[in-house]
Image: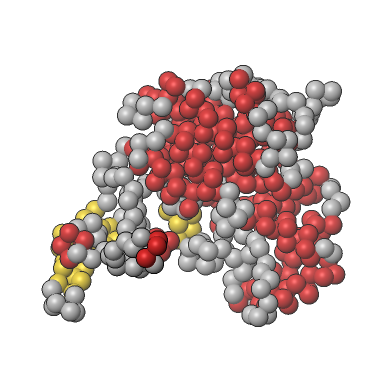
Amino acid sequence: MSANQDNAKTVTLTDNQTGKSFDLPVMEGTVGPDVVDIRKLYGESNMFTFDPGYGATGSCLSGLTYIDGDEGILLHRGYPIDQLANDSDFLEVAYLLLNGELPAEAEKTEFVNAITNHTMVHEQISTFFRGFRRDAHPMAIMCGVVGALSAFYHDSTDINDPHQRMIASRRLIAKMPTLAAMAFKYSNGMPFNYPRNDLSYAENFLHMCFAVPTEDYVIDPVIADAMDKILILHADHEQNASTSTVRLAGSSGANPFACIAAGIASLWGPAHGGANEAVLNMLEEIGTPDRIQEYVNKARDKNDPFRLFGFGHRVYKNYDPRAQVMRKSCHEVLEKLGVSDPLLDIAMELEKIALSDQYFIDKQLYPNVDFYSGIILKAMGFPTSMFTVLFAVARTVGWISQWKEMIEDSTQRIGRPRQLYTGPAKRDFVPVNKR
């Protein structure tokens, strides 16, 4: 992985106090804005940059995902997200993210078989689950269980061994839906379902979540397709908070299971992975369709703290490209299931307003992927506590691909952000009886 650095292209930084100037190299990626290389800035100028949240700092070289928020573009290894979601499947996208290219037929068959044959987990993990309270949040369970995988699979924790990295990557992709389904079943007091090798990745997950021993579970192809699309659309999203957490943890040499557990913990934050859960909570607050306009007016009022969740996006200043795919899938699922749920009625009416109301159009507050995925998961029968778990199942592919890319990048160093110290200057200690 490399980026072009044109020595003829530089940016000059001048210290107006001393008059000294520093020439900083400019690096060019395949697409997107150029990047100022500040790696030597501190050594040459005794200054470093201040960028809370790292919103203007490139922390790594990556060839996985490209986002242009102004134009509403999301590419995985160069392929538009809508093409992947409509014409591919989740494991093919997983192979693409991991390996850089789409698989040939034989490569895809081998990869799918490998993932399928790794879906079972060590039987003692079932005992491990019983250490959690029945009312434990599924994300709390996932943080603990995924981190504990390193205690069960010692043969794939050597990050310096390419073969072990490959085995760990495949194990995590394969076992994550099994563990997520176990967390779902455990919270409901129901028996665990073993995975089935005759089902696709999405079908198998639905089966493990909803099948019961007393009757056959028939998987609807419309529902399975919607689940597959949800997984694809959440597979990776550049250097977001949880992905950056995985990379930061991995930069220390931590094993891959611990790194993914760290990503899950970061994803659990309501400002990150909890967005689709917030959509359902908002719909519950609105309560009935006749109160929608009241809440739209509240959202318009700058002095009212209420905000509409699921509209607009921090990254996408235009339409979220994932939302276009998810909207179609959402309507297909609701039509197929024919569910009667007041919250879903509110959601559909709110969608109509957002797509036609001039206030939403002027501010480009279009429904995003979280709006539609929350509605779909609700219609499928998942409680809101499982929404972020579903996100984690999908994002594991991106996390492990980013982790693998980082390990194999010779320019990567252990993460060590700097700070602008604002505490007291040096002072002498005074014993308590003299203060």
Quadrant in which the C terminus appears: bottom left
| Relative to 179, residue 270 above or below | below
Q: Is residue 198 left or right of residue 405?
A: right
Q: Quadrant of residue 409?
A: top left
Q: Residue at x 62, y 37 (%)?
A: 141
Q: Nearer the viewer, residue 149 or 333?
A: 149
Q: Residue at x 60, y 37 (%)?
A: 142
Residue 149 lies, in percent from the top left, at 52, 28
Q: Nearer the viewer, residue 109 or 305?
A: 305
Q: How many marks?
A: 0
Q: Is residue 36 visible?
A: yes
Residue 273 lies, in percent from the top left, at 58, 51
Residue 229 lies, in percent from the top left, at 62, 44
Determine the residue located farthest toward the front in the rendered image.
Answer: 433
Q: Residue at x 45, y 39 (%)?
A: 259
Residue 28 lies, in percent from the top left, at 28, 58
Q: Is residue 171 left or right of residue 55?
A: right
Q: Is residue 56 visible?
A: no
Quadrant in which the N terminus appears: top left
Q: Nearer the viewer, residue 435 or 180?
A: 435
| Relative to 379, residue 291 above or below | below
Q: Quadrant of residue 53?
A: bottom left
Q: Nearer the viewer, residue 127 or 170?
A: 127
Q: Is residue 414 left or right of residue 72?
A: left
Q: Quadrant of residue 253?
A: top left
